[in-house]
Image (cartoon, rainbow, N blue to C red):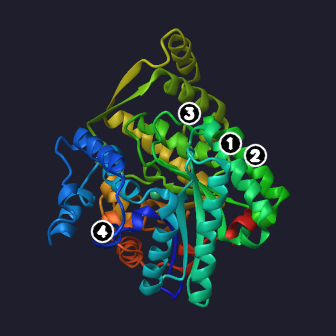
Amino acid sequence: MNNNLADLHVHLYGCLTPEDIWHMARDIEIDSNKIDLFSHNYQKVFGRPSNYEKYWMSSSGIENIAKDYLVTSRSNFQEFQAKFDLVPALFPLNPHAPLVLSHVIDKHQKEGVTYVEYRCFMPPYFNKEELRKYLDDLTSVCLEKETLYQSEIKPRLVMSLPRDPKLFRNLYLTLHQWLQQNPARQSFIVGIDLCALEANNPPKNIQQELAVVAKNNIIHPESALSILYHVGEQYDHISLCSSLRWVYEAVTIGANRLGHAAILGLDSNLLIDTEGEEPVSERIDHISWVLENSYWLSDYGIQPNSSQLRNELENLKNQPSTRKISLYYNQEYLEQFDQLQNALLKKLSTSPVVIESCPTSNSVLTDAPLNQSHPLVKFKKNGLNVTIGSDDPGIFNCSLSSELKLAESLIGPLESSERYYSKTLLAEVIK
Ligand SMILES: [Zn+2]
């Protein structure tokens, strides 16, 4: 391991630990509506109330926060989100985001992290003026800290945008205009990110919007933004094979780096005899995709029965598109899954796409165990570009260093190229 400690997949608010939350929130005025909303949802998801009234009333406040907030055992995304929501409830983005960023950069500097890309949510409920101020304030903190620490740490920002195409379009436009109006600050914002719920947000829905980003990247290389895409992390809303397809589609519509893509490396033995479901519309999309891509899938031994698939397609077109199809993952299904997974691993290993793998996060939010069945092992075996991230170290009770050690225990020594991808890489992609 060399001296460059780079974290390319970390969410700003997910960096706060129970200790941070306790110390930072005790002196601020808490918005009772926001914390009540958090608590109401918490009760709905977990069937028990959060203990937020006790956080600042006794010396065991930090323990109470940890009990409500830490995610250290297998959880679904809804449970994770319900816990994560404590942080924005206590520290609404306006005006607290710069304070949180300042605190987190100090912590990373002490840890010895040298380069970090913080994913910061771009709220659709801000007006244009508020968004501009938000970007001014966040980049001011980056500039101030980089100067203070004499570039020992280079803090950069990635703006997380909603997957809804209309919201995405409006926010991206404001971001793009801000970048053109603030050339001296351009270097601090290095990418955009699509995160949160994957369900009902197939990559095809955002294709046109990402094409605009890619076009602007070519016209304005000085303010080019990497396209970072969380995909293949939540696969309970569609079939396992559709989830694999989404990973591939994210790349074909322009993603430069994939967040997690766990399904692409998951050991199918872990999924035997489990069940799933997907809507008719998704099955239609999948069959259409297989038929359209059979010309290269056949290179990897996939020979779809075209006439059978076409018959199924005709039959499905007469059914309500939202009707759920139940799935049972038996040996036969998983053999097909393995074939498709292998084809996509091979295909993507020849592309410049980078997988951002977050070992602990995957072990909690997906079926990936921390052993040779972890997706990282297949990524490495197939020669994919991989970088290790900590995702939400405050809530997962981990750090970049512990994640790198975990990764090394799974795949052996990491080279610097496996952990360091920045605008340089994007520049190569654009060329
Ligand atoms: Zn993430």
Tell me the residue that label 3 is attached to: 303
Q: Does label 4 or label 2 sit earlier along the sequence?
A: 4
Is any part of residue 207 visible from this angle?
A: yes
Front-most of residues 122 and 369: 122
Tell me the residue that label 4 is attached to: 26
The residue drawn where x is 14% and y is 68% is 58
- Considering every residue shown, the one lying at the far front of the view is 29
Q: Amino acid at mark 4?
A: Arg
Front-most of residues 358 and 270: 358
Tell me where residue 227 appears, x and y as whole percent. 64, 55
Is 430 positioned to the left or the right of 347 in the image?
right
C-alpha distance separating marks 1 and 2: 9 Å
- The reply to whether the residue tagged 1 has its Cβ within 8 angstroms of ligand 1 is no
Front-most of residues 150 and 282: 150
Quadrant of the drawing holding the C terminus:
bottom right
Tell me where residue 174 appears, x and y as whole percent. 71, 51
Number of other residues with Cα within 10 Å of mark 3, as a class: few under 14, some 14 to 19, many 20 or more: few
Q: Amino acid at mark 2?
A: Val
Tell me the residue that label 2 is attached to: 212
Is 359 positioned to the left or the right of 255 in the image?
left
Tell me where residue 5 appears, x and y as whole percent. 50, 81
